[in-house]
Every structure is written in C-alpha cells, then in structure tokens.
Image (cartoon, rainbow, N blue to C red):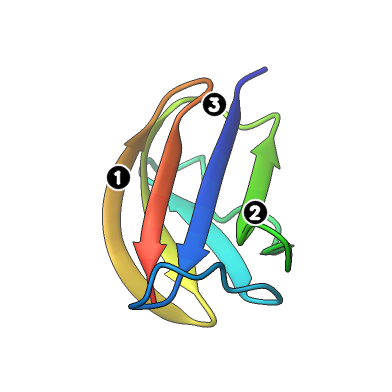
C-alpha cells in the first residue's frame, strides 16, 4: 500500500513537531485518516496503507486545501 508524507513547517521554514495531521479522502467510502503527529526533528507525519487519490489536509483542525496523494509523495504545509 502507498505511503504519503505531510511535512509541516512555519513561515521561516522550520519544522513544526507535535502538530495533529489528518487527511479527508474524497469519495463516499474513503473517509478520514487516523490522526498522525508531526515529528519534532523534521515536521513530517507519515500515512501508510491508504489508497492514492485526492484528500483534504487538516493540521490541528484547520484545512490546508486539497492535494492529490501518490505513493512516495510529500506535501509541505506552511502553518
């Protein structure tokens, strides 16, 4: 199954650890991912075993838009 990464940074490009990241997948049967916490050292939250496709990214409950996820993709969110 695919692996996706969401990297959370601040406006200065510094990684933001401890952020709660969730993905809301498009499609009637897909739903929300489990919450993942971004790592302190690199700001990354990894998502495993979800199908590829369009998903809305939420960081600490706020939407940061829709992105298409493919295996190995990394999306960077500036919080």
Which quarter of the rendered picture does the C terminus lie within?
bottom left
Between residue 6 and residue 42, name the one nearer to us: 42
In this rendering, is residue 33 above or below 62? above
In this rendering, is residue 7 above or below 54? below
Crowd class of label 3 (few under 14; some 14 to 19; many from 20; radius 10 Å): some
Secondary structure beneath label 2: strand
Between residue 51 and residue 58, name the one nearer to us: 58
Crowd class of label 1 (few under 14; some 14 to 19; many from 20; radius 10 Å): some
Q: CA distance from mark 1 to mark 2?
A: 15 Å
Residue plotted at (38% across, 40% down): 27
Residue found at the very far bottom of the displayed protein? 61
Q: CA distance from mark 2 to mark 3?
A: 16 Å
Secondary structure beneath label 1: strand
x and y, in percent, of residue 71 in the image: 51, 20
* Badge number at residue 51: 3
Q: Where is mark 2, residue-wise?
A: 45
* Badge number at residue 56: none
Single out the mark in the foreground, 1 or 3: 1
Q: Where is mark 1, residue-wise?
A: 67
Left or right: where 70 falls relative to 39? left
Left or right: where 12 falls relative to 51? left
Q: Earlier in the sequence, mark 1 or mark 3?
A: 3
Q: On the image, which quarter does residue 16 sit in?
A: bottom right
Q: Earlier in the sequence, mark 2 or mark 3?
A: 2
Residue plotted at (70% across, 57% down): 34
Residue plotted at (67% across, 64% down): 38
Q: Earlier in the sequence, mark 1 or mark 2?
A: 2
x and y, in percent, of residue 37 in the image: 72, 66
Crowd class of label 2 (few under 14; some 14 to 19; many from 20; radius 10 Å): many
Residue plotted at (73% across, 68% down): 40
């Amino acid at each position: 199954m695919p692996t996706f990464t969401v990297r959370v940074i601040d406006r200065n490009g510094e990684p933001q650890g401890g952020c709660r990241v969730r993905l809301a997948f498009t499609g009637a049967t897909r739903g929300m991912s489990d919450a993942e916490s971004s790592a302190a050292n690199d700001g990354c939250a990894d998502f495993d075993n979800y199908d590829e496709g369009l998903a809305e990214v939420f960081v600490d409950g706020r939407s940061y838009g829709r992105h298409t996820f493919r295996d190995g993709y990394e999306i960077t969110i500036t919080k």
